[in-house]
Amino acid sequence: MAKYLYIPYADKEEAKKLGAKWDKKAGSWFIPDDVSEALFSKWIDSREPSVRFADELTSHGCLLKPGEPVCDGQCHRIQVAGDKGREQSGFYVMHLDGVPNGYFMNNRTKDSFKSIYLNRGVDERESPEEVRKRQEEFRIQQEKAEQERQKQERYVAMTIRSQLKKMSTTNDVTSPYFRKKRIPGSIFTFVEGTGENLITWIPLYDIHKQLTTAQTISPQGEKRFVKGGRKHGSFHVVLGKIEQEDTTVIICEGYATASSIQYCLCDYREVKVVAAIDAGNLLPVAQSLRERYPDKHFVIACDNDHLSEKNVGVDEGKKAAEAINAAVVIPKFADGDTGTDFNDLMLSSGKEAVMKCFLTDLLV
């Protein structure tokens, strides 16, 4: 295989003197077989792909712990600058098999990158047969990985289902988190533990009403997902399920927000509120619900991250609304008010303030 490498235009004469050749068809410089690769170390990153990937993660604000990144081809959560407590807003995947490559996404800021780490900076071009063989091996590997992932998700869902059967509902036992947010309990949410250390469980379901994962919330509001479950496209309906007679479906981020909206609109029996759990999940949840319920009126109730440099709540909410032709409702706060969602609006301004946001735009 010919060894191709990137040479900046300003360095092309120096590279030519060292023996590099220009492949016009490929549009790239390459090192002839009879020329030592060592001569071109200036343009070759000699570090291992995992080390280079770690540097990129750090440059994007990731707070690496010993042993990170884990380069096993699986998704891993990671803390990023701005996270509080045990929050992990970032996730990454790093593959070392085949062509080493890594991907990172910050769920809060939507900052991301995807990089390929080819042979320490040297691109060894494969023959068509080598390409076909590698692609087939990769396809088989991906199929096996997907089968294993689905198997793991089914096991996690089964385990969660079994655990929930042993718990009390928040309708019977007061959740410290619900009390803090001043939202009512439900037969569809659960608590685990004793006293003020009760952990609140919010089960999530897919569009086929199958349990997929659960979000746990500590009394202090720390939120985590059960490891190995499937969050993407999963959601929680505050009143259990969407009925045929329901005319309007409101989709928002967190459960406390959803519960607050449902409570404030309790006089409107044909309205159901859905928690997509976070901004990044609004779009897949909205798309799956629109496909399942094409005749219903949809509303996206955005979080208003007005104190942040980038208003992710509004940006992601509008993106989801545009994708499914839904209305958009955004909570408005007075100067100096640090609130961001409809639960905050309810706590600071009352039930009527939340009702007014929705009545003005869609219910009258």
Image (spheres, rainbow, N blue to C red):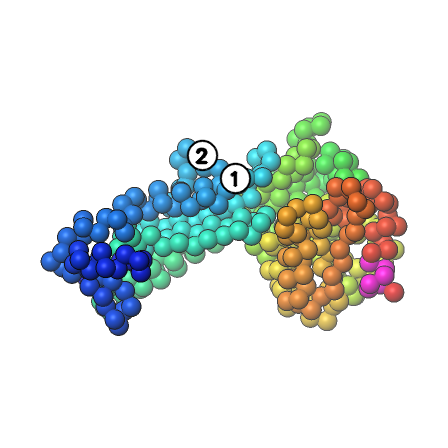
Quarter in which the N terminus is drawn: bottom left
Q: Which residue is mark 2?
A: 65
- Could you classify mark 1 by the number of other residues whose Cα lies within 10 Å: few (under 14), some (14-19), or many (20 or more)? many
Which residue is found at the position 86% from the left and 48% from the top?
351
Q: Quadrant of residue 3?
A: bottom left
Label 1's element? loop
Tell me, yes or no, whether the highlighted magenta stretch contains residue 202. no
Q: Main secondary structure of the magenta part?
A: helix
Residue 48 x/y as whole percent: 30, 44
| Residue 197 point in image, percent of width and height | 67, 29
Depth check: 161 or 325 in front?
325
Could you tell which of marks 2 and 1 lies nearer the N-terminus? 2
Q: Residue at x 64, y 48 (%)?
A: 309
Q: Is residue 361 magenta?
A: yes
Quadrant of the rendered structure where residue 184 is? top right
Relative horizontal placement of residue 84, taking residue 296 as reference (left or right): left
Residue 363 percent location from the top left of the image:
84, 63
As shown in the figure, which amino acid type bears the numbered disc 1?
A: Gln
Residue 331 visible in the displayed image: yes
Q: Is residue 259 visible from the viewing direction of this image?
A: no
Judging depth in this view, the residue of 134 and 79 nearest the camera is 79
Q: Quadrant of the C terminus?
A: bottom right
Q: Relative to residue 345, is residue 60 drawn left or right?
A: left
Find the magenta span and give its range. Answer: 358-363
Badge 2, how many Cα within 10 Å: few under 14, some, many 20+? few
Which amino acid, mark 2?
Lys
Residue that lies at the very extreme toward the left in this rendered image? 34
* Residue hosting label 1: 79
Circles 2 and 1: CB atoms closer than 8 Å: yes
How far across and down, in percent of the image, does residue 49 sit?
33, 47
Left or right: 118, with 246 as reference point: left
